[in-house]
Amino acid sequence: MIDLPFLLAEEIEGGLFDFNGTLPLMALQFLTLMVLLNTIFYKPVTKVLDERDEYIRTTLTTASSMLVKADELAAKYEEDLSEARRNAQLKIASSQKEAQNIVSEDIKKAQLNAEKLIAEASKQLNVQKEEALKTLENQVDTLSDQIKVKLLSSQS
């Protein structure tokens, strides 16, 4: 004999979907469980997750604003550094120019001093030459007088 439950026209009790008094009771238990889980578990967990999400958002916002400030400060420091380098280069260039001017003035002074010394030495040499010539003339005169005296004395 073939016993097929779907062929039987009579209803079997205790099946999966019995529409009797236990169905509303099960629905009431399910709804009560949902309300309890919602108030005891889901709301606190959702609240913690929302707080964590808000904390992460504020932290990210703060971090991004700090990053923007850091970028601005870095740009300002770079600008200040380039300006300081530019000023330093200008000071170095002006110092080099001033040093060159001082050196060229010192060279001119040294050249003038050397020219004065040369002129003075030349003047002294001319004076000494004149004195030597006068001395030589005097000696020549003296020698010529002596020669003359000797010649005259030897002739007489």
Image (tube, rainbow, N blue to C red):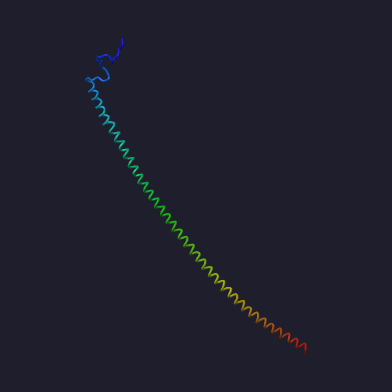
Q: Is residue 93 above or below residue 21?
A: below
**Which picture quadrant has residue 80?**
bottom left
Q: Where residue 105 sits in the image (x, y, percent)?
A: 51, 68
Residue 95 shown left or right of residue 124 in the figure: left
Q: Where residue 43 sits in the image (x, y, percent)?
A: 28, 33
**Which picture quadrant has residue 151?**
bottom right
Residue 20 shown left or right of residue 150 in the figure: left
Residue at 43% x, 55% y is 82
Residue at the outermost left position: 21
Q: Is residue 115 above or below residue 64?
A: below
User: Which of these two is toward me, 33 or 75?
Assistant: 75
Residue at 50% x, 64% y is 100
Q: How many numbered discs?
A: 0
Q: Where residue 19 sits in the image (x, y, percent)?
A: 23, 20
Quarter of the figure that contains the C terminus: bottom right
Residue 61 shown left or right of residue 150 in the figure: left
Residue at the outermost front position: 7
Q: Is residue 156 above or below residue 3?
A: below
Residue at the outermost top position: 1
Quarter of the figure that contains the N terminus: top left
Residue at 28% x, 32% y is 42
**Which picture quadrant has residue 31?**
top left
Residue at the outermost right position: 155
Q: Where residue 104 sits in the image (x, y, percent)?
A: 52, 67
Q: Is residue 106 above or below residue 146?
A: above
Residue at 40% x, 51% y is 75
